[in-house]
Amino acid sequence: MRLVILSMLASLFLVIFQTSIAPFFQIGIIRADGFCALVTWLAVEAPFIPSSLLAVLIAGASASMASVAAWYSYPAAFFLAYLIVSYNRIGIMDFTYLHRILLTCLAAFIIELFLFMSGGNLEGFWPWGLMQSLFNMLLAPLFFTIFHSVSSMFQKIGNLRRTENDQETI
Amino acid sequence: MSFKKEKRPEIRTRIITVLLVLAILIGSSVVALRFDLLSLIISPGRQLFQETTGDLQKVIFPPLATLRRNISSHLNIDAILEENRLLKTEVEQLQQEITTYREAIVENQHLKQLLNMKRQVSCPVKVANVIGVDLTPWRAVIKIDLGRNQGIRRDMPVLSGAGVLGRVIEVNPSSSTVMMLTDFDSRIAAIIQRNRARGILKGRGKEPCLMEYVEKGIGVEPGDKVITSGLDGIFPKGLLLGEVDRVENGPPADLFQTIEVRPYTDTDTVEWVMVMLTKE
């Protein structure tokens, strides 16, 4: 549930940020994109768990509503990226920060490729899609920090409520 | 007795001497004034003296004056710092005012362009602000602040001050989505104004648009104006689209020539648009 709420809030924030603020700092078609980092973060924090999967689909649906791309493009792209990143995450024993960043690059690569393909503009993937993926990888640590902070806040609130309920029971 | 006798001649001598000197001075002054001897004797000497002392003064006085100025300025450093601070504040305020005025000038120019464009179209229009862009960076789609409640409908043409911008593709109660002519999915029926060659203007994102299906053999030259043909039922005929940038005939097997068209509208910097109310 925590992941679902986080995904909804993050999606709302990212849609507003990426459609109203980030375009002013755009270079060509390279724009700050936090959705790739969100999908990676969900896949890394809770791989193959129904709530994280639902959170990814909610993020996809939110992104789809803010874009004229085909309605299935974002949910499908995010879902595919989530599966691949989760699969890779399970295989890594000593998970470090560098792994997170590289997995974000992989997720961004998959998402951009899928979006270009589904939009009928595959030739645009080189070089812009690739550069966007690399740019997303560079921005990932910033978004990870934000997501982790918000998630920790939710966890603390959840723990507090649980403690209060336990005290009431006693 | 002899002492007193010696003193009397001395005093008398002195008195006579003083009187004599006075008489000479007065007499010479009267004579000098009467015959203007001062200008003959004293003036050249005075001038020589002034010249000599003046040369010395030129060497000595300015450095001393500078030194005095520096010393007094160091002593008045607090006053200078305060004045500096006040001047800096005033400069910042003035720069802010200049920025505001420049913004007003730019807005004025844009709105004048829109007004000029409005005079060229025959149907009612509404001016809208751009409030966002599409989430997908390579899509040339924007959002405007007019919607169904303001009379906007799907497929209404949207213009900028320079020409056609695009068309409305999605309508919400108080906002709408506009696909610009440079979007990959944009297709507009167009003609070359000079020779009336018909084709379809296709968007290619950041690249110049392509005018497709123009047969080979029809002379199209760089600089030709491209306008709407009105055949798509969306855009009225005669609206400015762009200018031909490059023409390529391609391989002999191709039926059509490749024409690159640079739109008149700068889709990266558009802030105000005009929606033509062509539908009920």
Image: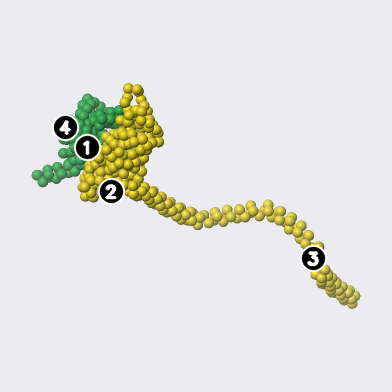
Foreground mark, 3 or 1, reads 1
> Label 4 to label 3, Cα distance in Å?
120 Å
User: Which three-letter amino acid code belongs to the residue tagged 2?
Assistant: Cys
Q: Which chain is yellow?
A: B
Q: Which chain is home to disc 4?
A: A
Q: Secondary structure at mark 2?
A: loop
In the drawing, what numbered circle is on residue A49? 4
- The disc, 3 or 2, on the residue closer to the chain's N-terminal end is 3
> Which marked residue is nearer to the observer: mark 1 or mark 4?
1
Look at mark 2 in the image and give the residue it sits on.
B123
The reply to whether the C-beta atoms of the residues labelled 3 and 2 are less than 8 Å apart is no
- Residue shown at the point (35%, 45%) measured from the top left: B161
Residue at mark 3 to residue at mark 1: CA–CA distance: 108 Å
- Asked whether the beta carbons under mark 4 and mark 3 sit within 8 Å of each other, the answer is no
For badge 1, the amino acid type reads Ser
**Which chain is painted in green?**
A
Which residue appears at 34% of the width and 22% of the height? B252
Q: Position of residue B11 (x, y in %)?
A: 85, 74
Q: Which residue is mark 3?
A: B38
Q: Earlier in the sequence, mark 1 or mark 4?
A: 4
